[in-house]
Amino acid sequence: MPTQIDYKAMGERIRHARKAKKLSQEQLAEMCSLSAAHIGHTERGTRIPSLDTIFRISQALEISIDYMLLDSLKNHSDSLANLKSIIEKMPPEKQVSIISTIKALCSYAANAPS
């Protein structure tokens, strides 16, 4: 799992979400009290946004911060395969406990407000 944020990939996800809402960079900038140039730099990954900026953009685009920062599930397939491998090596009683915990977390996440 990467230990650094891929700002270029984050910018691409922001651009995709902005375009899905049919917003221009100028409109998003106005909604976030930022400059259009700042939004452009953020989308290109040439500027590291502050936590406040990330929050403002996530609110304006109605997307979660984890979506902005993390890759999609498709890109996490290696991580999921690695977790599966780790769980399969555990004794059966521990597997049941781990799987129950994961299911509970997934249920919580699915019902938690975003």
Image (cartoon, rainbow, N blue to C red):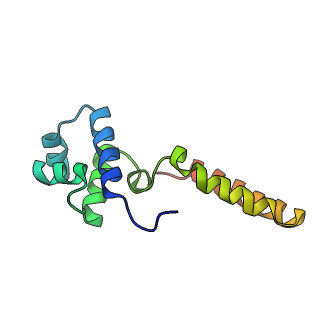
The correct choice, above or below, for 3 with respect to 114 in the image is below
Kindly identify the residue that appears in the image at 68 percent across and 59 percent down. Answer: 83
In the figure, is residue 105 to the left or right of 71? Answer: right
Residue 14 placed where, x, y %?
31, 46
Left or right, 11 with respect to 83, comes to: left
Nearer to me, 42 or 34: 42
Compared with 10, 97 (above or below) is: below
Q: How many numbered circles are shown?
A: 0
Q: Is residue 107 visible?
A: yes
Residue lying at 44% horizontally and 55% vertically, measured from the top left = 70
Apparent side of residue 99 relative to residue 67 in the rendered image (left or right): right
Percent position of residue 45, x then y: 25, 55
Which of the two residues, 40 or 6, is positioned nearer the viewer here?
6
Which of the 4 image quadrants contains residue 89?
bottom right
Name the quadrant containing residue 42.
bottom left
* Residue at image coords 28%, 47%: 60
Residue 47: x and y in percent read 20, 60
- Position of residue 113 relative to residue 49, above or below, is above
Residue 108 visible in the current orientation:
no
- Outermost right residue: 92
